[in-house]
Image (cartoon, coloured by chain):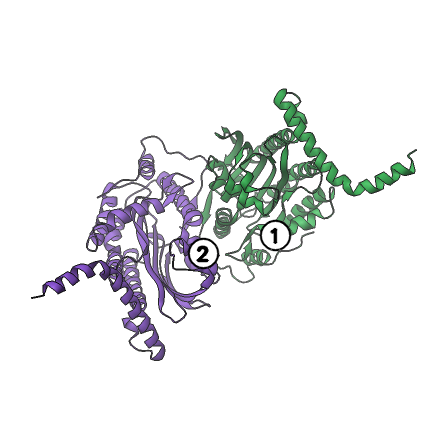
Chain colours: A purple, B green
Amino acid sequence: MTSPLSNLFVQISINFQLRAYKMQALENDAKKVARLRENDVKKETLLRKRMEQYIKSLQERIVKEIESIDGKKFLIDRWEREQGGYGISCVLQDGKVFEKAGVNISVVSGELPTLAIQQMKSRHKELDPSKGPFPFFAAGISIVMHPHNPHAPTIHMNYRYFEIEKEDGSPLSWWFGGGSDLTPSYLYEDDAIHFHKTLKEACDKHDPNYYPDFKKWCDEYFYLKHRKEARGVGGIFFDDLDNKPPEKIFEFVKQCGDSFLESYVPLVKRRMNTTFTANEKEWQQIRRGRYVEFNLVWDRGTKFGLQTPGSRIESIFMSLPLTARWEYMHVPDKNSREDKLMQVLKHPNNWV
Amino acid sequence: MTSPLSNLFVQISINFQLRAYKMQALENDAKKVARLRENDVKKETLLRKRMEQYIKSLQERIVKEIESIDGKKFLIDRWEREQGGYGISCVLQDGKVFEKAGVNISVVSGELPTLAIQQMKSRHKELDPSKGPFPFFAAGISIVMHPHNPHAPTIHMNYRYFEIEKEDGSPLSWWFGGGSDLTPSYLYEDDAIHFHKTLKEACDKHDPNYYPDFKKWCDEYFYLKHRKEARGVGGIFFDDLDNKPPEKIFEFVKQCGDSFLESYVPLVKRRMNTTFTANEKEWQQIRRGRYVEFNLVWDRGTKFGLQTPGSRIESIFMSLPLTARWEYMHVPDKNSREDKLMQVLKHPNNWV
């Protein structure tokens, strides 16, 4: 049905298609921004707006499901950022199942400080600090859940969409980032396998390289260099993802977000009523200490937040456990269950 | 008895005396180092050796006194640093009075990494990173004590002597640093006054500017920018102190070290048996959380240690409390005792 000439054209253009698609998507978004500035309608068609709507509805779904497991209600705070934007923080503290569970979204915009541009420069060549500050937009969801029971694992999930604009409002740069990782105090291999399998399924629907690449990235990112140990049994992590059309990556991110409850709820239901000893609780508290160490010493997001004027400390620190413990020279007995976890943290496993 | 000519010489030379004294002290030390390399005698005359002996004997005295208060013995570890030097860590954990008390000394030497030189460059102009790495020597004592009772304050003290050598072994640069600060969970003005008065008396014996200058420096250093609050009621802090002959500063540092027990023991004895409620204990745990935040996010020493290869993590983290707590959006009731502490942390006081 197509001529040989048009076939050839398809062959040639295929190499440029991805780039063109991305450029066009950016231009479309830019045009949409421009249009919106004249006429504040059809907001829902903009990617940034749809990301905002998506994380809002995901937050609602997750809060509802976790409340049904715990029995206690989340405390919900909506806050405004002086420099532009808002957030909704949902925190459940001292519940029946959860010591602390937080589900935050934030949708912020404003001027990206020169310092932040310099930090991003190595990953985003298009950012010229001398031409800044640039207007930016960021929308993200961030979740951390610490159950009481030492046999039930801690979970973390975070997905964010970032845009940097040129002066005329057209996007100079955009990307997605995020991931999800599991931090048990006691190793249940079945749990780690279920968690990774769910994430792999979500990834595989979009790109066969996503799971292996992002699993590796996760092991590297959630690593406590000063302890020479991983934070937990990993998961997936990626940042600066912009090598496909934004709509495609948005679909992938939604798939990951949608898989949260499936990846975690079965594990917490399975372990939340396991009987435990005082020693097991103490071990969990020591592991919580490592969680604090990672977040305060290494986590880029936390560090960035703490040094950014106008950021909401209470929302950043929602990720910290309710309680933690630091014992001097605590080393688990050889071949104990605690030691078994440590072996996996020292030598990351391939779970699927 | 002296001629007018020699009197004149004294007048002229007085301006140069301080500088000459310092230069000579450095040269003397350099000569001593050289001599020692030929003949390993008279080690005790070297400042670095005397600093080492001083912190060792101070460690012994403090450990003995704290053991007599607590009733439990310190765990004593001597460790060797692969790259050069050693340390002695004394830690008392879960005692009768103290949740955790650590008294560390370390005497380390080796090559100062270029990164460390670059960080020090702004304060030490004589360091040219292109000429490094330089051999260095550092000897210090570091103390943190967290009592169980929420009415008894946490104390921190640290004094260190640092030398950077030229290739021929003569000192290129040397300085002292350190200080001591008090972190109560409940404000007892008498305690803060006693603490500051003891430090002021130690300072005043050496220089009338020391206490006011170092009190201010302490308020600035032990400050949690992300919380807009001080860590505690302050004390003294100084760094890069080299503006007097080294022997003079060493005398001052010894005076400060010697005042530790006097500054703290009366306070802990006064408060260790005060009855307290579960709410007061919880408030202490929240304040412990802030202590962890300061040490992991802001403290230069901790950051430096975590990023230095071969440093002993267990000794660095000895400063962390045994237990800590992070509650979402915890704000003390207006005019409560907890709020009274917060007011002082927001607006540092002059205690003497």
Q: Which chain hosts label 1?
A: B
| Rendering coords of residue A173 (x, y %) | 35, 62
Query: For this rendering, which residue is in front, A167 or B298?
Result: A167
Q: Alpha carbon of mark 1 to alpha carbon of mark 2: how far?
A: 31 Å
User: In the rendered view of the protein, which quadrant contains the N terminus of chain A?
Assistant: bottom left
Q: Along the horizontal axis of the image, is A196 left or right of B50?
A: left
Q: Residue at x 48, y 56 (%)?
A: A307
Q: Which chain hosts label 2?
A: A
Disc 2 crowd rating (10 Å Cα; few below 14, some 14-19, many 20+) is: some
User: In the rendered view of the protein, which quadrant contains the C terminus of chain A?
Assistant: top left
Q: Is residue B72 visible?
A: no
Q: Which residue is mark 2?
A: A118
Q: Along the horizontal axis of the image, is B169 left or right of A45?
A: right
State the count of labels: 2
| Rendering coords of residue B334 (x, y %) | 54, 63
State the image quarter where residue B50 is shown.
top right
- In the picture, the disc for residue B219 is 1
B290 lies above or below B138: below
Q: Is residue B288 visible?
A: yes
Among all residues in the image, which is located at the extreme front?
A5
Q: Secondary structure at mark 1?
A: helix
The three-letter amino acid code for the residue at tag 2 is Gln
- In the picture, the disc for residue A191 is none
